[in-house]
Every structure is written in structure tokens, then in C-alpha cells.
Amino acid sequence: MCGIVGYIGKRQACEVLIKGLKRLEYRGYDSAGVAFSGDSFRIYKCKGKVSDLEEQLKDKNINGCMGMGHTRWATHGEPTNNNAHPHQSMNGKFVIIHNGIIENYAKLKSGLEKEGYKFASETDTEVLANLIEYVYLHNQNNGDSLSCVDAVRVALNMVEGAYGLVIMSEDNPEKLIAARKGSPLVIGIGRGEYFIASDATPIIEYTNSVIYLNDDDIAVIGLDGLNLTNLKKVKQIPNIKKIDLKLDEIEKNGFEHYMLKEIYEQPRAIRDTYRGRLNFESKYLKLGGLHNVFSELKEAKRIMIIACGTSWHAGLVGEYLFEEFTRIPTEVEYASEFRYRNPVINKGDLVIAISQSGETADTLAAIQLAKKAGAIVIGICNVVGSSIPRETIAGVYTHAGPEIGVASTKAFTAQVTVLTMMAMAIGQANQGLTEKEFEDLIGELYAIPDKIEKILNTSNHIKDIAEKIKDSTNSLYLGRGYLFPVALEGALKLKEISYIHAEGYPAAEMKHGPIALIDEKMPVIVLATKDHSYDKIVSNIQEVKARKGCIIAIVTEGDTTIKEMADYVIEVPQSDFALAPLLTVVPLQLLSYYIAVYRGCNVDQPRNLAKSVTVE
Ligand code: M6R
């Protein structure tokens, strides 16, 4: 949440900053701003998107080879011009941009007010700018001159919370200071130039050499190089990594929206996720990232999955998979609940944290709690080098490629692919699966991308259904077993991008309450592929029909029974029922996408949301 870019080098900074902010806009789009150093600071900012800022910059002095930019997801204070970043300290000494939350800001603010500080915004960030300045000037007045970076260090030691920061100072105008705790920050190293960003996407156009800052790191960056220390002023050795991210992976490549591109990328994403790990011919499956902990995994007495949002839905599918394939008791919990409720965690329990971004604050905090309690904590993440893979002892990357649309799509199917492989590997090792079952599943999983391609080819039919139901104000998603989490995911997709109220329910629960909602205006999307509870779901459909609900059924190819009852059917190819989530979720993603487009919603940047939730 919130995107940060900084630049120092030989190029015009503004161009790098604006391009970078556009790439980071998925992290928040409430306001945008830039600042340049020179004889004095030039700060331009406004409520709205980066394109609004660009308009504002047309007649401004934006010359300069050093600067920083910010795109905001509001936490403290509404999206207004005043609350937009960058924020300047009261006496003009420091300008800062910030991603994260300063939790003790109220206390710090009242202390600063007593010292005569006045505030122009409601943000916690301005409090930090003034705190740094206060430390700097106070020491000067007392005759102990403190360098700008040392003032930053002292101030950050007083702060509770999370931050990714870039700071410019009036008295050291040729340096950028970057600091991190809890919120991600990457430094790109070019030839005689440096880039700072919340993730690598603004950087890859210029260089593939990066340093991921660790918590408590403070970097001072100038044309003469980079100096890395920590909050205790201990020198740190920069660990330079090469990133393997291509520019076209973060472009729309002819699709109208990132979300649509990412839906269509799913066959490729799943193939990339199992490539090198699963072999159809030799019936081989190996997850290299789990090698070091595999013997503990197969002995685990309990599995706990922690995640948020769509990743939590993938985790629910994981619960069904693990219990069925490995017979190890498995629980799934929202990371935000887990971290605050004193959960029972036994030494040797296996905790699996799932996150597309690898930066979700609640998931990170839950990992730390589980580690402290002695659990084996492993991760399933998409973003290489992000915080969660670094916090976990082992893990498996999904190779979905960058997911930029705020509504998660390919990350879900890639996560379910990894969970399926994990459950299969453990199930093979602990005999939860017979060799025949294991081999059949390899074939089934291998075939999934082709089957998704078939579903994608029916998108015009799904678009027609979307047009019919686009004006609904409510909708219900029903599923059983493996398809219950898919019902939840379908409902979340619809809510977040089209603002239609939607609820996912286990189909059998309908008669315990939600059935009261059903009338002819209520679309009911039923996941009804052929599995052992098919007859039950057929009965559920009849119950809805008897109350005049409009039924959209996701069925197995060739199903004639449900076709006669439902208003609309969408067919998906037959598969093993444990893998049906990977297929049935796709029409639901497309349905939400087209409904949102028909309603004129901003699909990639839905209101109030941001992609990477780095605040609690
Ligand atoms: O990056 P993560 O997977 O940890 O993110 C978790 C949720 O914030 C995310 O899935 C969110 O619910 C999406 N907007 C869903 O489409």
C-alpha cells in the first residue's frame, strides 16, 4: 500500500518518477506527488491519480536529476491535496515520502506540538518529517551537530510501526536517504545512477541489479555511491541480487485491462508453476524449495494455513487437499485473526503462509508469531525476494509472474497448483495416497492448463450472461466441498470490482438462512460440476428455482440435467473433483470482469482498494 519511487543519476528524475509511479499505482491511487531537490525543494502533489499529477506538472519547473515520488493509499486522513505526499517538515529542512503506519504518531505529535510544531496535514508521515527535523535542529541548538542521516536514525529509533521511507534534506541536498522497517523497499543499481522503489517494477527498465533492504536498514545514496547501515549505526554489507523480470511481463500487451490479461495468463502461469517440479512422463514430483524440511513436513501432526483475502480462499482449498491426500488435520485461518487471538501452536506444527505479494502485514505478523512458538513456517509466494519468503524457513514460489490487477486471479490458481503439489508430495510420502492415485493426479494436474484454455474460449458466452445480470444489486454464490471456497472467491471478485453485494455460501447452508433472500431479482451462481455431491447440488438448484431465483450454473461439459433447470449454464471440462477449483474459478473471474466493465467500473483500480496490503 502506497508506492514509493526515488531517483538520483544523470537522467531527468521526473520522467523516471512518473513512469515508476504509474507502475506502482496498483498499490494505491488516492493521491500522488513528487519532490525535486535543488536550490530549494520543489514539491508538487494532488488528490487523485498519477495522471492528475502529470497534468499539474505541465507548467512547473521539474528539472533535476534527483527526486522522489509517491502514490498514496490513505490511512491517516482523507485523500486530499494536503494529505498527499511528499511531506515537508515545518522549517523546511526535510521532505519525506512514506509507505506504512507510524503507530505512536499521536503521542509523537502532541510532544512536537508542545515544542511549537504546527501541522499542515492529518498524516502520520508529516509527524515523522517534523520529528526528524526536531531531532536535527534540537541537537544543533545544543551545540552537538548531528548529520542528517543520524537525525533520521535517532528519530526512527523513537518510532513504533512500519515504514518504507525516502528522505531528502536541505543541508545535504545531493543525497537520498532510504529506510525500511516492515514495508518493502528495493534499490536498483545502474551505471552512475540509483533507483529506489517499493518493488522492482519501476526499476527493471534500467537495471536488473538490486538490493532488497532489510528491516532496520538505512541507506544513504549519492552519485558517489551507497552507504548502508542499520538503526544501531552498524555497517551493513549490501547484498546485490539479479532480478529476472521482463518489461513485457508488466505491460498490458494489448489487453484492455491487467485483470483480463492475468485471467488469460492462467494456463501459462500454472504450467510455469509446475514446470521442473512435476513430470508427466516419469510421474515425478519434487518441490525443491521444501527439500530441507520435507522429512518434518511428512511427520507433521497438524497443518495451519494462514493468509488473507483470495490467498485465504486458496488456503481453504488447501485444507480439503491436505486432509484428503495426507490425512493430516488442517486448519485455515485469517492471518489477522490468528495473530491476535493467542492460538495454540505446538512445536513441530506446520504453518503455511500464503501470499501473492509476500508483503501482507497481517500475514507477516502471523508468521512471526508462529515462528516464536516453534512451528515450522513455510511460504507460498509469488513475488521473489519479498518479505514473506525471507521470513520463512522454506517455501515454494508460484511462478504466476507479476500480478498487477488489484483483483487477484492468476495468483489464486497458481497458489492452488502449489498446494495441490504439496499435498500430493506429502501424501505420496506418508501413504495418504496410493501410488495409482498419485500418478492419476499427476496426469490430471498436467492437463489443467489445456482445460482452462478451453474455458477461456467460451468468454463471449460468459460476457453475454454478464450483460443479463449486470444491474443486479445482490447475488449469491453456492458450492459444496472443494467448490465452497470457489464460491467465496467468486463472490469476492464480484464485490471488489463491480461493487455488487455478493455472498458465498456452502450450498447446504442456504436453507439455514440465506434462502430468505431469494426472489426473481437474485442471481444465484451455483458451482455444480459432477462429483460425489452432484445430486445434492441438483436439489439445491431446485430449491432456488422453486423460489424463482435466476440460476447461473457452472457445470461439467455435457451435463443435461442442470441445463433443463438453470437459466444459464457455463460448461467446464471434466476433471478430478479435487482439481475442479482450478477450472470453475475461471468463469467466475470472467463473469465479474465483464459485469464490472458493463457497469463502467475501474477494473484494475477498484475504489478504496490497493494491491499490496502492507498495513494492518
Ligand atoms: O498479497 P496477498 O496474497 O497476501 O494479498 C491478500 C489479499 O489482500 C488479496 O488477496 C486481496 O483480497 C485481493 N484484492 C483479492 O482479489
Image: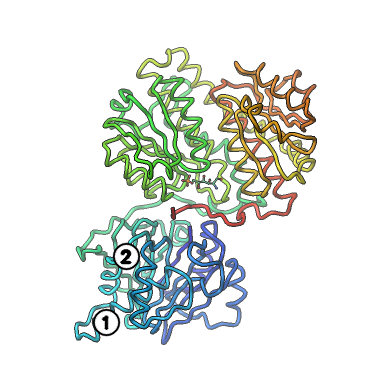
Left or right, 516 with reference to 210: right
Percent of width and height locating residue 428: 39, 18
Describe the element under mark 2 as helix, strand or loop: loop
Q: Label 1: few (<14), some or many (≥20) within 10 Å? A: some
Per the image, the residue denoted by label 1 is: 138
Per the image, the residue denoted by label 2 is: 159
Residue 352: which quarter of the image? top left
Q: Nearer the viewer, residue 277 or 116?
A: 116
Percent of width and height locating residue 393: 30, 39
Left or right, 142 with reference to 80: left
Q: CA distance from mark 1 to mark 2?
A: 17 Å
**Residue at position x 56%, y 20% from top?**
576
Q: Is mark 1 within 8 Å of ligand 1?
A: no
Q: Give, as a three-letter code, the residue at label 2.
A: Val
Describe the element under mark 1 as helix, strand or loop: helix
Q: Nearer the viewer, residue 337 or 410?
A: 337
